[in-house]
Image (cartoon, rainbow, N blue to C red):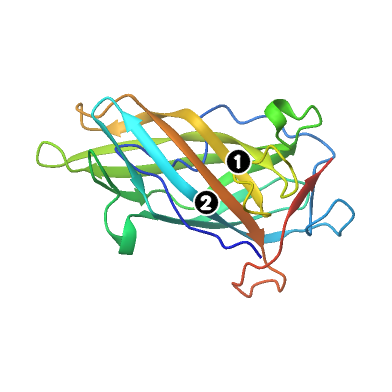
Amino acid sequence: MARIRQTAIIGTAALAVLAAGVAPAYAAGTTIRQGSTTAGAYSGNVQASLLGTATVSTSIGSGSCSESTMTGSINSDGTNLNIASATFSGAGGGPCSGSTSSTITALNLPWTGGTVSYDSGHTSGRDAAVTIANFKVRAVVNLFGGITCEFGGNLTANGYNGDNASRPDTSSSDAQVGVQNAQVSKTGGSFLCPGTATVSATYALRGETTAGSGTYDQALYITG
């Protein structure tokens, strides 16, 4: 089992687990499976833990976080990806750090209506498009005595199976969601907040072998 190193979203921005964009249409035939192309279908709880380092840069500074976890659930056909909890912090639970530091809080949980859609064309080497719908986060940035910025919308990222040579972190054999230099948009907060932030991050995805156990030890695999 690959060791998951939890890292996270940062800066004055928002949720870097994923790339800002319009949610893709659900692709009929998507199946989430229990770790391989021939394994049984998987429905239930899922966990996303970041791999490596996540970064955010904006017009007023940049930074990185060292800890992040999101949990939620999904149907085996890729529908109803819902996020019930999401945390983002620096080492030991402190603020994310860099040229600016910030405290990031998830708002309006649960985030409901997301999807996982198998990509038969394998765009940019991916196996699927993964969308978190209706996300919203608040970042309190340590500038000018403290400013509050809010970011939200629909986030779409590339999904990779654990045996895909194009996956962002080849040291991990988990299914992954990755975004590189994508933008998220401001939805509220101070006029000093930048309109966009550029984010890069990779998450490892797992399910539960025993439903409801809270132990995320089930590998996941996406097929058409």
Image quarter hosting the C terminus: top right
Left or right of residue 34: residue 134: left
Q: Determine the CA span between mark 1 and mark 2.
A: 9 Å
Q: Can you tell which mark lies on residue 168?
A: 1
- Residue 201 appears at what percent x and percent y? 49, 41
Looking at the image, how many numbered discs can be counted on the residues? 2
- Residue 143 appears at what percent x and percent y? 15, 38
Query: As rendered, which of 151 and 166 lies closer to the eye?
Result: 166
Residue placed at 50% from the left, 43% from the top?
A: 17
Relative to 105, say whether 147 is above or below.
above
Image quarter hosting the N terminus: bottom right
Residue farthest along the front direction in this orientation = 171
Relative to 191, say whether 126 is above or below.
below
Left or right of residue 104: residue 203: right
Q: Secondary structure at mark 1?
A: loop
Q: Can you tell which mark lies on residue 51?
A: 2
> Do residues under tags 1 and 2 come within 8 Å of each other at their CB atoms?
yes
Query: As rendered, which of 50 and 166 lies closer to the eye?
Result: 166
